[in-house]
Each structure stands twice: as C-alpha cells, then as structure tokens.
Amino acid sequence: MQIIDAALFTADQPWGARDLAHLGDATVRLHWTNESYHWHVNDGPEVFVVLDGTVRMHHRTGGVESHEDLRAGLVCIVEVGDEHVAEPLGTARILVIEQAGSE
C-alpha cells in the first residue's frame, strides 16, 4: 500500500506525470502542470479529475468551441472523439485515468 499526498506532487515540466497504477488496459496518472496541453482527440475514454487548482477545459462540438472551468473536486469525462484541450489557470494537479498509451 502507498499513500501519496497529491498536493506535494510537482514535475520537471508541464504535464509531467507520476504513474500510479495500471488497471488492465488503463493507466492512472497524477499530472502537474502550469501550461496548456494541445488540442487532441483521445482514442479511448478519459476520466479527468481536478485535485488542485482550476482547469479550463476547452472543447469543440460541430466546429463550435466552448469551455467549462473545472475546480478541484470536479470530474470531466471525455468520450472517444471529443476534441479538447486543458488549460490550467495557474498551477494544477490532475488525476487522469485513460487507455494505456493514449495521448
């Protein structure tokens, strides 16, 4: 058993991660970032949990862009084919569960 204080986790670069577990074909990672990711589409579903900070999740549907501000405690479920990009508003720590090898 391990106990990890996510509030103390930092990385050497934005979106640096610590692998926490592998669950079948899925990975569970703790990410730290202070910069936006890039627009992308996952090849599998993704569960995105903001642990610390606020993340503006931009998404496009039918060519129309919108966003939601995710504060600590909110969970975002990204389905296959959802075009999105995460933009932290400051520093954020995020738990991501996704298909192994996903972007």
Image: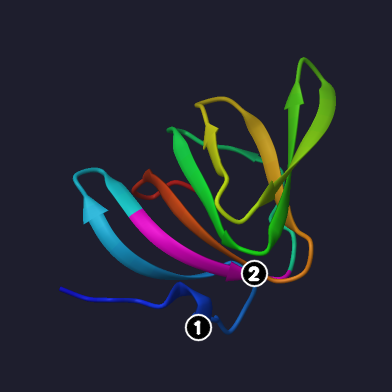
- Which of the pair 94/27 is nearer the observer? 94
Residue for badge 1: 8
Mark 2 secondary-structure assignment = strand
Classed neighbour count for the residue bearing mark 2: other residues with Cα under 10 Å, few (<14), some (14–19), many (≥20)? many
Dominant secondary-structure state across the stretch colored magenta: strand
- Which of the pair 2/42 is nearer the observer? 2
Q: Could you give the CA–CA distance between mark 1 and mark 2, rounded to whole angstroms? A: 13 Å
- Which of the pair 31/102 is nearer the observer? 31
Image quadrant where residue 11 sits: bottom right
Residue for badge 2: 33
Magenta part of the protein: which range?
Answer: 28-34
Q: Nearer the viewer, mark 1 or mark 2?
A: 1
- Identify which amino acid the numbered label 2 is placed on: Thr
In the image, is 44 to the left or to the right of 67? left
User: Horizontal and vertical percent for residue 84?
Assistant: 68, 38
Residue at 60% across, 56% down: 72
Up/down of 26 relative to 30, above or below: above
- Which of the pair 98/91 is nearer the observer? 91
Question: Is residue 29 shown in magenta?
Answer: yes
Mark 1 secondary-structure assignment = helix
User: Horizontal and vertical percent for residue 15?
Assistant: 59, 67
Question: Is residue 16 shown in magenta?
Answer: no
Up/down of 63 relative to 65, above or below: above
* Residue at far left of view: 1
User: Horizontal and vertical percent for residue 42?
Assistant: 52, 37
- Identify which amino acid the numbered label 1 is placed on: Leu
Residue at 52% across, 76% down: 7
Residue at 51% across, 27% down: 79
In the image, is 35 to the left or to the right of 21? right
Classed neighbour count for the residue bearing mark 1: other residues with Cα under 10 Å, few (<14), some (14–19), many (≥20)? few
Up/down of 46 relative to 95, above or below: above
